[in-house]
Image: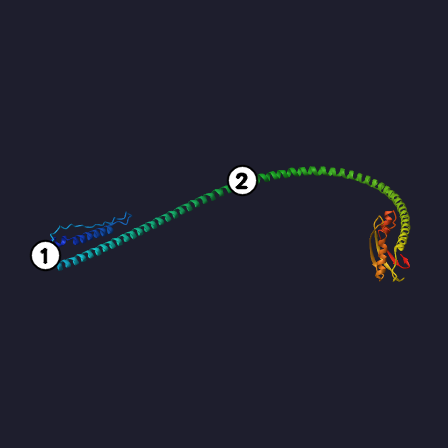
Amino acid sequence: MRDHQREVTTTGVPPWKSPVALSVTLHLLILGIALAGWSWTSPVEEPSPRSISARLITQQEPEPSPVVDPVDQQKRDEERRAEDQRRQEEAERQRQEEEARRIAEQKRQEEQKRLQQQKEQERQEAAAKEREAQKAREDEAARKKAEAEAKERARQKAEEQKRRQEEARRKAEEEKRRQEEQRKREDAERKRQEELARQEAERKREEAERKLREQQLEAQAEAAQRAREEEARRRQEAAAAKAREAQMLSESEKYQALIRERLSQAWYPPSSATENMTARLQITLLPTGELSGVRLVSSSGNTAFDNSALGAVRSLSRYPIPNDRDTFERYFRQFTIEFNPRRLR
């Protein structure tokens, strides 16, 4: 039975037609095509090559289920598992290689894009520099043109200014001659007028001097008359003032005597008073004769004596005063009085 089994397993599909061989061959073919296409491609930008992934599926013909020895069966299972493991590793390796190719392709495309962008930037920079150079040339040409035009305008302006200056100088000379002639005529007329004015001024001066002498004489006479009148008025006023003063003094003495009499009647010195004690008080009155205020100017040295004098002044409700306001303001608006046991002053 074992010999029969070996014969069945070895007389199947040829080895180069086995699924493993076909799969490895197909993957190698795809890898070779991809590498050849990558190396032959032009550096010009083009769409990324498409990755081709293929899997060969072989359908084995059904074989009769021979009677298998358990030991051989276990060996075949191990071989099958090893084959499956190898296939998986091969598939993983191919996937990693594919991923590496994809990353390499992506990097190549990115580098190519970067180079293209760099070239484009360099081209744009060169174009910008060319535009700037062109603009500089145009600006320089415009500047030279403007300078030439400015020089031409300056020349024309200078010529026009020179012509105007010549014209102005000619007119100025004519005006100067005309003004000189006018000045001569005016000088002659002015001299004539000055002579007439001098004669008229001389006549007016003489007339003014005559009038001034007359006015001075009249003023002196009037001043003498006013002086005599003023002297007479001053004498009259002095006499009247003297009479008024004498009248006011006489009237003030009369009312001062009345006030001293009223105060002596109202004053009651203390028993401790002596003849050497004197209290001086300042009295302020209202125009109605009422007491406005009293102040102790000089003390007697005795408080009771001073208070008795203050009490006497405050006890009078109304003081006798003159009707004449000037006499009141001068002698009775504010006055001082001395209290002494022998006299009131």
Q: Is residue 332 visible?
A: yes
x then y, percent, for residue 296: 83, 58
Which marked residue is nearer to the observer: mark 2 or mark 1? 1
Mark 2 highlights which residue?
160
x then y, percent, for residue 99: 26, 53
Mark 1 highlights which residue?
5
Q: Tell me the kind of residue under disc 2.
A: Glu
Point 49% across, 43% down: residue: 150
Q: Is residue 13 left or right of residue 301?
A: left
**Is 99 or 84 nearer to us in this picture?**
84
x then y, percent, for residue 320: 88, 50
Q: CA distance from mark 2 to mark 1?
A: 130 Å
Q: Mark 1: few, some, or many residues within 10 Å (few <14, many ≥20)?
A: some
Q: Tell me the kind of residue under disc 1.
A: Gln
**Is 28 or 218 nearer to us in this picture?**
28
**Is 1 or 234 nearer to us in this picture?**
1
Q: Earlier in the sequence, mark 2 or mark 1?
A: 1
